[in-house]
């Protein structure tokens, strides 16, 4: 195994600055390596240290994470106002690239789980949505695509009140126009253009964002698909409609999912589609109980309706007072309109983060009719060039 063997009081040292990090706990583990909670005696504080596997491929990927976070932190968010995790230090220790971050608390999936998958209150959903959008505005300005936005990669900062969230894990991120990988994003949050193999932009993060907002409110993923085909069918059933024909015409993987019927595209598995009348049915008791302990994967059996409007109108059920219900129902209508602009099949029509930030669901203005976003103002061309430094000043790996 190419992981560094860690134990309590193991000391990681930045050989250049002589800064010492004393391992106290393990915060996370993944394919890239490990994340440890470390003690810094000088300032009597904790940091999170991502210790990358002793492997050139992971080293290179983590170098990209360092470069992009540097740009985001120092060029675009020097005052730490935009809900993006702060990178503090990086160094190589025993051939492991180590990145230190400010320490944060539980992630949004853990929060949903702590709440027994019943969904968060609309106030909290609005607050977190505003904060995530704020980060996405900055990321779009920087021309940086996160590529793996999901509740697990959004952490709650426990050091401030009211609670603040921060986006972490730029380990899959890339620069717009320099997209190398085609197999990106976690399935539930994967955009139609990535699924179908069409050139992608920062708009893919907006799709994921829409899925996250819905999940924060519902307590369950919007598209809990168990395969790519299932994902596409769920999108079509829940949203009503399908990706636009010009996208289907130009996408690489269209023939994997669609057959060409005259001038229109039909889902390949037409019969199967007919059989599936709903993306959602009520959980059985056993399933519900299983869900208490682990992430619900069973997807197919959630709610008893298919359309986005019905899902948001009917779930989650809340035991509110009649007056509160009336107010909440109005906000739910605004939420559906908000989600429609985000989980929009056409990446060209999908709202930008700035456009979405004007929506009444977030601003609190009364929602009267479908929101027309202000036109996207042409962006000031990005003056900086994000150069991805594959050896960010930490000496040679091999
Ligand atoms: P990956 O998803 O590529 O495995 P992440 O950067 O998401 O790597 O980190 C893995 C896990 O480590 C996170 O899901 C989280 O639980 C924990 N973690 C990462 N960064 C921090 C941090 N700054 N503070 C607290 N926990 C963290
Ligand atoms: Mg992660």
Image: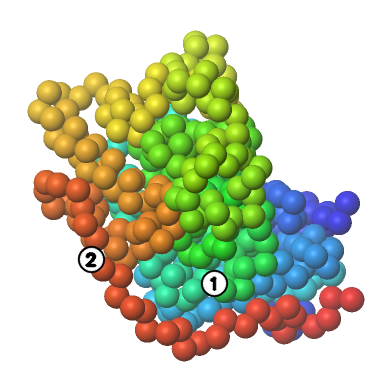
Q: Which residue is mark 1?
A: 176
Residue lying furthest bottom in this view?
A: 383
Q: Nearer the viewer, residue 74 or 246?
A: 246
Relative height, residue 292 to residue 21 (above, below):
above
Q: Position of residue 304 (x, y in %)?
A: 40, 19
**380 on left or right of 35:** left
- The yes-or-no answer for disc 1 within 8 Å of ligand 1 is no
Q: Position of residue 99 (x, y in %)?
A: 66, 68
Q: Nearer the viewer, residue 7 or 225?
A: 225
**35 on left or right of 200:** right
Q: Which of marks 2 and 1 precedes in the sequence?
A: 1
Q: Position of residue 277 (x, y in %)?
A: 45, 20
- Secondary structure beneath dot 2 equals loop
Residue 38, image quadrant: bottom right
Return the mark for residue 374.
2
Q: Residues within 10 Å of mark 1 (few under 14, many from 20)?
A: some
Q: Position of residue 362 (x, y in %)?
A: 24, 53
Q: Residue at x 55, y 27 (%)?
A: 270
């Amino acid at each position: 195994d190419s992981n560094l063997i860690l134990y309590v009081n193991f000391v990681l040292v930045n050989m250049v600055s002589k800064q010492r990090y004393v391992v106290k706990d393990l915060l996370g583990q993944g394919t890239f390596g490990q994340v440890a909670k470390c003690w810094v005696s000088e300032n009597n504080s904790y940091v999170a240290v991502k210790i990358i596997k002793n492997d050139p491929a992971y080293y290179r990927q983590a170098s990209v994470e360092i470069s992009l976070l540097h740009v985001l932190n120092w060029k675009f968010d020097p005052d730490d106002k935009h809900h993006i995790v702060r990178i503090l230090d990086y160094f190589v220790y025993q051939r492991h690239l180590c990145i230190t971050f400010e320490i944060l608390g539980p992630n949004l999936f853990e929060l949903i789980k702590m709440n027994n998958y019943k969904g968060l209150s609309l106030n909290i959903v609005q607050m977190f949505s505003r904060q995530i959008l704020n980060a996405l505005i900055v990321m779009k300005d920087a021309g940086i695509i996160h590529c793996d936005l999901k509740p697990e990669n959004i952490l709650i900062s426990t050091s401030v009140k009211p609670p603040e969230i921060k986006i972490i894990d730029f380990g899959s991120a890339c620069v717009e126009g320099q997209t190398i990988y085609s197999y990106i994003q976690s399935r539930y949050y994967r955009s139609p253009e990535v699924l179908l193999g069409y050139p992608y932009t920062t708009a893919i993060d907006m799709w994921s964002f829409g899925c996250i907002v819905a999940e924060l409110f519902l307590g369950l993923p919007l598209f809990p698909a168990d395969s790519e085909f299932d994902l596409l069918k769920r999108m079509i059933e829940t949203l009503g409609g399908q990706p636009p024909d010009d996208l289907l015409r130009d996408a690489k993987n269209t023939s994997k999912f669609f057959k060409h019927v005259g001038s229109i595209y039909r889902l390949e598995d037409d019969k199967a589609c007919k059989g599936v009348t709903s993306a959602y049915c009520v959980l059985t008791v056993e399933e519900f109980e299983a869900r208490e302990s682990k992430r619900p994967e069973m997807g197919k059996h959630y709610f008893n309706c298919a359309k986005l409007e019905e899902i948001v109108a009917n779930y989650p059920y809340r035991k509110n007072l009649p007056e509160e219900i009336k107010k909440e129902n109005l906000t739910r209508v605004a939420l559906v309109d908000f989600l429609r602009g985000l989980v929009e099949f056409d990446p060209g029509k999908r709202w930008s983060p700035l456009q979405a930030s004007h929506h009444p669901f977030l601003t609190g203005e009364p929602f009267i009719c479908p929101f027309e976003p202000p036109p996207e103002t042409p962006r000031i061309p990005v003056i900086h060039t994000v150069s991805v430094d594959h050896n960010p000043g930490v000496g040679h790996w091999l």
